[in-house]
Amino acid sequence: MDKHPNAEEVVKRDVCVLRLASERLDAVSVPELVRPPVAHDTPPTDELVAWAVKVYFYSALCQFRELLRSTLLLVHEDHIAAVFFCCRGLFELAAHAYYVKKHVLQHRKSNDLRAAWKLLFEINLGSRDVREKQKAEGNQPDYPEGPHIAKVMACFNEYFPHGQKEKQATETYSSLSEFSHPNCFAFINHFEWDTDLRNMPKVTFGRPMRNQLALCLPAASIAVMSFLHSTGELVGAIGDGDLFKAIEGIVHEVLENH
Protein backbone atom coordinates (compact mmCIF):
# COMPACT_ATOMS: atom_id res chain seq x y z
CA MET A 1 0.00 0.00 0.00
CA ASP A 2 1.31 3.46 -0.94
CA LYS A 3 2.37 5.66 1.93
CA HIS A 4 0.55 8.98 2.04
CA PRO A 5 2.95 11.96 2.17
CA ASN A 6 3.11 13.82 5.45
CA ALA A 7 2.65 17.57 5.73
CA GLU A 8 6.36 18.29 5.36
CA GLU A 9 6.57 16.21 2.19
CA VAL A 10 3.46 17.87 0.75
CA VAL A 11 4.90 21.33 1.37
CA LYS A 12 8.25 20.41 -0.17
CA ARG A 13 6.59 18.90 -3.23
CA ASP A 14 4.29 21.84 -3.89
CA VAL A 15 6.96 24.46 -3.31
CA CYS A 16 9.04 22.73 -6.02
CA VAL A 17 6.07 22.85 -8.40
CA LEU A 18 5.45 26.53 -7.72
CA ARG A 19 9.12 27.45 -8.00
CA LEU A 20 9.59 25.71 -11.34
CA ALA A 21 6.39 27.22 -12.76
CA SER A 22 7.41 30.66 -11.51
CA GLU A 23 10.83 30.46 -13.13
CA ARG A 24 9.44 29.29 -16.47
CA LEU A 25 6.58 31.79 -16.56
CA ASP A 26 8.98 34.62 -15.80
CA ALA A 27 10.79 33.71 -19.02
CA VAL A 28 7.65 34.32 -21.14
CA SER A 29 8.03 37.75 -22.74
CA VAL A 30 5.10 40.17 -22.68
CA PRO A 31 4.96 42.10 -25.97
CA GLU A 32 3.19 45.33 -26.80
CA LEU A 33 -0.17 44.59 -28.38
CA VAL A 34 -1.43 46.90 -31.12
CA ARG A 35 -5.21 46.94 -31.53
CA PRO A 36 -6.43 45.97 -35.00
CA PRO A 37 -7.93 48.92 -36.94
CA VAL A 38 -11.55 47.99 -36.25
CA ALA A 39 -13.88 50.82 -35.22
CA HIS A 40 -15.75 50.33 -31.95
CA ASP A 41 -19.14 50.72 -33.64
CA THR A 42 -18.51 48.08 -36.30
CA PRO A 43 -18.90 44.30 -35.98
CA PRO A 44 -15.89 42.63 -34.33
CA THR A 45 -13.56 40.62 -36.51
CA ASP A 46 -11.75 37.40 -35.73
CA GLU A 47 -8.52 39.40 -35.55
CA LEU A 48 -10.03 41.76 -32.98
CA VAL A 49 -11.26 38.86 -30.83
CA ALA A 50 -7.79 37.26 -31.01
CA TRP A 51 -6.26 40.57 -29.88
CA ALA A 52 -8.68 40.72 -26.92
CA VAL A 53 -7.75 37.14 -26.00
CA LYS A 54 -4.09 38.13 -25.93
CA VAL A 55 -4.86 41.19 -23.80
CA TYR A 56 -6.53 38.86 -21.31
CA PHE A 57 -3.80 36.23 -21.45
CA TYR A 58 -0.90 38.59 -20.85
CA SER A 59 -2.76 40.47 -18.11
CA ALA A 60 -3.67 37.22 -16.36
CA LEU A 61 -0.14 35.89 -16.85
CA CYS A 62 1.42 38.96 -15.23
CA GLN A 63 -0.95 38.72 -12.28
CA PHE A 64 -0.48 34.96 -11.91
CA ARG A 65 3.29 35.06 -11.83
CA GLU A 66 3.29 37.98 -9.38
CA LEU A 67 1.13 35.89 -7.07
CA LEU A 68 3.50 32.96 -7.54
CA ARG A 69 6.50 35.08 -6.58
CA SER A 70 4.67 36.42 -3.55
CA THR A 71 3.63 32.93 -2.45
CA LEU A 72 7.18 31.61 -2.62
CA LEU A 73 8.59 34.63 -0.80
CA LEU A 74 6.02 34.33 1.98
CA VAL A 75 6.65 30.58 2.32
CA HIS A 76 10.38 31.18 2.55
CA GLU A 77 9.88 33.79 5.28
CA ASP A 78 7.34 31.61 7.16
CA HIS A 79 4.52 34.15 6.79
CA ILE A 80 2.02 31.31 6.89
CA ALA A 81 -1.22 33.27 7.25
CA ALA A 82 -0.49 35.44 4.22
CA VAL A 83 0.26 32.38 2.07
CA PHE A 84 -3.41 31.41 2.27
CA PHE A 85 -4.38 34.74 0.68
CA CYS A 86 -1.97 34.21 -2.22
CA CYS A 87 -3.08 30.61 -2.75
CA ARG A 88 -6.68 31.73 -2.82
CA GLY A 89 -5.75 34.36 -5.42
CA LEU A 90 -3.99 31.77 -7.58
CA PHE A 91 -6.98 29.44 -7.35
CA GLU A 92 -9.36 32.27 -8.27
CA LEU A 93 -7.30 33.20 -11.29
CA ALA A 94 -7.08 29.60 -12.47
CA ALA A 95 -10.86 29.32 -12.18
CA HIS A 96 -11.24 32.60 -14.08
CA ALA A 97 -8.97 31.40 -16.90
CA TYR A 98 -11.00 28.19 -17.19
CA TYR A 99 -14.23 30.20 -17.34
CA VAL A 100 -12.89 32.53 -20.04
CA LYS A 101 -11.43 29.67 -22.08
CA LYS A 102 -14.65 27.68 -22.00
CA HIS A 103 -16.94 30.51 -23.07
CA VAL A 104 -14.65 32.10 -25.65
CA LEU A 105 -14.17 28.74 -27.36
CA GLN A 106 -17.93 28.12 -27.27
CA HIS A 107 -18.61 31.45 -28.98
CA ARG A 108 -15.90 30.85 -31.57
CA LYS A 109 -17.26 27.38 -32.31
CA SER A 110 -20.69 28.85 -33.01
CA ASN A 111 -19.04 31.67 -35.00
CA ASP A 112 -20.58 34.27 -32.70
CA LEU A 113 -17.85 36.90 -32.69
CA ARG A 114 -20.14 39.50 -31.11
CA ALA A 115 -20.70 37.30 -28.07
CA ALA A 116 -16.99 36.50 -27.83
CA TRP A 117 -16.08 40.20 -28.03
CA LYS A 118 -18.73 41.16 -25.47
CA LEU A 119 -17.46 38.53 -23.04
CA LEU A 120 -13.83 39.60 -23.44
CA PHE A 121 -14.79 43.27 -23.06
CA GLU A 122 -16.50 42.43 -19.77
CA ILE A 123 -13.59 40.26 -18.67
CA ASN A 124 -10.84 42.75 -19.50
CA LEU A 125 -12.60 45.90 -18.29
CA GLY A 126 -15.29 44.68 -15.88
CA SER A 127 -15.43 46.47 -12.53
CA ARG A 128 -18.44 46.20 -10.26
CA ASP A 129 -16.99 48.81 -7.92
CA VAL A 130 -16.48 51.51 -10.57
CA ARG A 131 -19.81 50.68 -12.19
CA GLU A 132 -21.71 51.10 -8.92
CA LYS A 133 -19.94 54.38 -8.16
CA GLN A 134 -20.83 55.75 -11.58
CA LYS A 135 -24.46 54.73 -11.12
CA ALA A 136 -24.55 56.31 -7.65
CA GLU A 137 -23.37 59.58 -9.19
CA GLY A 138 -26.24 59.44 -11.66
CA ASN A 139 -24.03 58.66 -14.65
CA GLN A 140 -24.43 56.00 -17.29
CA PRO A 141 -21.78 53.40 -16.37
CA ASP A 142 -18.86 53.16 -18.78
CA TYR A 143 -17.55 49.99 -17.21
CA PRO A 144 -19.20 46.61 -17.75
CA GLU A 145 -19.68 44.08 -14.96
CA GLY A 146 -17.56 40.95 -14.97
CA PRO A 147 -18.75 37.51 -13.85
CA HIS A 148 -19.23 36.97 -10.13
CA ILE A 149 -16.66 34.70 -8.50
CA ALA A 150 -19.38 32.24 -7.41
CA LYS A 151 -20.41 31.81 -11.05
CA VAL A 152 -16.78 31.39 -12.10
CA MET A 153 -16.13 28.81 -9.40
CA ALA A 154 -19.28 26.86 -10.27
CA CYS A 155 -17.97 26.62 -13.84
CA PHE A 156 -14.51 25.58 -12.58
CA ASN A 157 -16.05 22.54 -10.88
CA GLU A 158 -16.04 20.96 -14.35
CA TYR A 159 -12.25 20.84 -14.31
CA PHE A 160 -12.23 18.20 -11.57
CA PRO A 161 -13.30 14.54 -11.70
CA HIS A 162 -16.94 14.36 -10.57
CA GLY A 163 -16.62 18.13 -10.17
CA GLN A 164 -20.21 19.14 -10.77
CA LYS A 165 -21.41 16.45 -8.36
CA GLU A 166 -18.85 16.99 -5.61
CA LYS A 167 -18.22 20.70 -6.33
CA GLN A 168 -14.52 20.32 -5.58
CA ALA A 169 -13.56 23.76 -6.89
CA THR A 170 -16.26 25.47 -4.84
CA GLU A 171 -15.30 23.49 -1.74
CA THR A 172 -11.59 24.20 -2.16
CA TYR A 173 -12.20 27.90 -2.65
CA SER A 174 -14.47 27.97 0.39
CA SER A 175 -11.78 26.29 2.49
CA LEU A 176 -9.11 28.77 1.38
CA SER A 177 -11.50 31.62 2.17
CA GLU A 178 -12.16 30.25 5.65
CA PHE A 179 -8.46 30.64 6.44
CA SER A 180 -8.44 34.13 4.91
CA HIS A 181 -11.44 35.57 6.74
CA PRO A 182 -11.61 36.65 10.41
CA ASN A 183 -13.13 33.48 11.81
CA CYS A 184 -12.15 30.36 13.74
CA PHE A 185 -10.05 28.72 11.02
CA ALA A 186 -7.80 31.77 10.90
CA PHE A 187 -7.81 32.29 14.67
CA ILE A 188 -7.07 28.74 15.83
CA ASN A 189 -3.83 28.80 13.82
CA HIS A 190 -2.50 31.13 16.50
CA PHE A 191 -3.26 29.32 19.73
CA GLU A 192 -3.12 25.99 21.49
CA TRP A 193 -5.44 24.84 24.25
CA ASP A 194 -5.22 22.34 27.07
CA THR A 195 -8.69 20.83 26.82
CA ASP A 196 -11.72 21.06 24.56
CA LEU A 197 -12.87 24.28 22.88
CA ARG A 198 -15.73 24.80 25.34
CA ASN A 199 -13.53 24.61 28.43
CA MET A 200 -10.11 26.16 27.91
CA PRO A 201 -8.42 27.06 31.22
CA LYS A 202 -5.20 28.05 29.46
CA VAL A 203 -4.56 29.24 25.91
CA THR A 204 -1.06 29.68 24.47
CA PHE A 205 -0.64 32.03 21.51
CA GLY A 206 1.94 32.00 18.75
CA ARG A 207 2.61 31.95 15.04
CA PRO A 208 1.01 29.31 12.79
CA MET A 209 2.85 26.02 12.38
CA ARG A 210 4.59 25.48 9.04
CA ASN A 211 2.68 22.25 8.47
CA GLN A 212 -0.44 24.39 7.96
CA LEU A 213 0.92 25.12 4.49
CA ALA A 214 -0.16 21.61 3.52
CA LEU A 215 -3.73 22.94 3.68
CA CYS A 216 -3.24 25.55 0.96
CA LEU A 217 -0.21 24.82 -1.23
CA PRO A 218 -1.83 21.82 -2.98
CA ALA A 219 -4.56 24.16 -4.21
CA ALA A 220 -1.87 26.46 -5.59
CA SER A 221 -0.26 23.57 -7.46
CA ILE A 222 -3.63 22.62 -8.94
CA ALA A 223 -4.08 26.26 -9.92
CA VAL A 224 -0.74 26.25 -11.74
CA MET A 225 -1.63 23.26 -13.90
CA SER A 226 -5.17 24.43 -14.58
CA PHE A 227 -4.07 27.96 -15.46
CA LEU A 228 -1.49 26.61 -17.89
CA HIS A 229 -3.94 24.16 -19.48
CA SER A 230 -6.68 26.78 -19.91
CA THR A 231 -4.52 29.59 -21.23
CA GLY A 232 -2.55 27.23 -23.46
CA GLU A 233 -5.74 25.91 -25.05
CA LEU A 234 -7.04 29.45 -25.47
CA VAL A 235 -3.97 30.90 -27.20
CA GLY A 236 -3.68 27.76 -29.31
CA ALA A 237 -7.25 28.26 -30.53
CA ILE A 238 -6.50 31.77 -31.80
CA GLY A 239 -3.55 30.48 -33.80
CA ASP A 240 -0.60 31.65 -31.70
CA GLY A 241 1.50 28.54 -32.16
CA ASP A 242 4.68 29.88 -30.55
CA LEU A 243 2.91 30.94 -27.38
CA PHE A 244 1.00 27.66 -27.28
CA LYS A 245 4.26 25.69 -27.54
CA ALA A 246 5.83 27.77 -24.76
CA ILE A 247 2.92 27.08 -22.40
CA GLU A 248 2.76 23.40 -23.32
CA GLY A 249 6.50 23.14 -22.72
CA ILE A 250 6.05 24.45 -19.18
CA VAL A 251 3.21 21.98 -18.57
CA HIS A 252 5.32 19.01 -19.69
CA GLU A 253 8.34 20.13 -17.68
CA VAL A 254 6.32 20.50 -14.49
CA LEU A 255 4.71 17.09 -15.00
CA GLU A 256 8.03 15.39 -15.75
CA ASN A 257 9.76 16.85 -12.71
CA HIS A 258 6.92 16.41 -10.22
Image: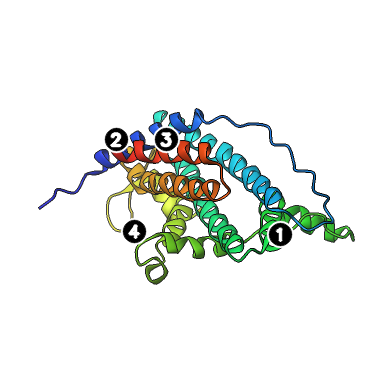
Marks 2 and 3, how far apart at CA? 11 Å
Q: Nearer the viewer, residue 102 or 135?
A: 102
Tell me what residue is drawn at x 60 percent, y 32 percent: 30
Q: Which of 45 and 40 is in front in this view?
A: 45
Residue 25 vs residue 122: left or right? Answer: left
Q: Where is residue 90 drawn, in percent x and y?
A: 49, 45
- Which residue position is annotated with label 3? 21
Q: Which of marks 2 and 4 is nearer the N terminus?
A: 4
Q: Which of 102 and 7 is in front in this view?
A: 102
Which residue type carries mark 4? Leu
- Taking the view exactly as shown, the residue that stands out farthest to the bottom is 165
Q: Where is residue 219 drawn, in percent x and y?
A: 40, 49
Which residue type carries mark 1? Lys
Which residue type carries mark 2? Asn
Q: Which of marks 2 and 1 is nearer the N terminus?
A: 1
Q: Which of marks 3 and 4 is nearer the N terminus?
A: 3
Tell me what residue is drawn at x 24 percent, y 39 percent: 9
Marks 1 and 4, how far apart at CA? 52 Å
The image quadrant that residue 83 belongs to is: top left
Mark 3 vs mark 4: in front = 3
Marks 2 and 1, how far apart at CA? 40 Å
How is this picture coloured? rainbow
Please report contact status of discs 3 and 4: CB closer than 8 Å, yes or no.
no
- Which residue position is annotated with label 1? 118
Mark 2 vs mark 4: in front = 2
Please report contact status of discs 2 and 4: CB closer than 8 Å, yes or no.
no
Q: Which of marks 2 and 3 is nearer the N terminus?
A: 3
- Which residue position is annotated with label 2? 257
Marks 3 and 4, how far apart at CA? 41 Å
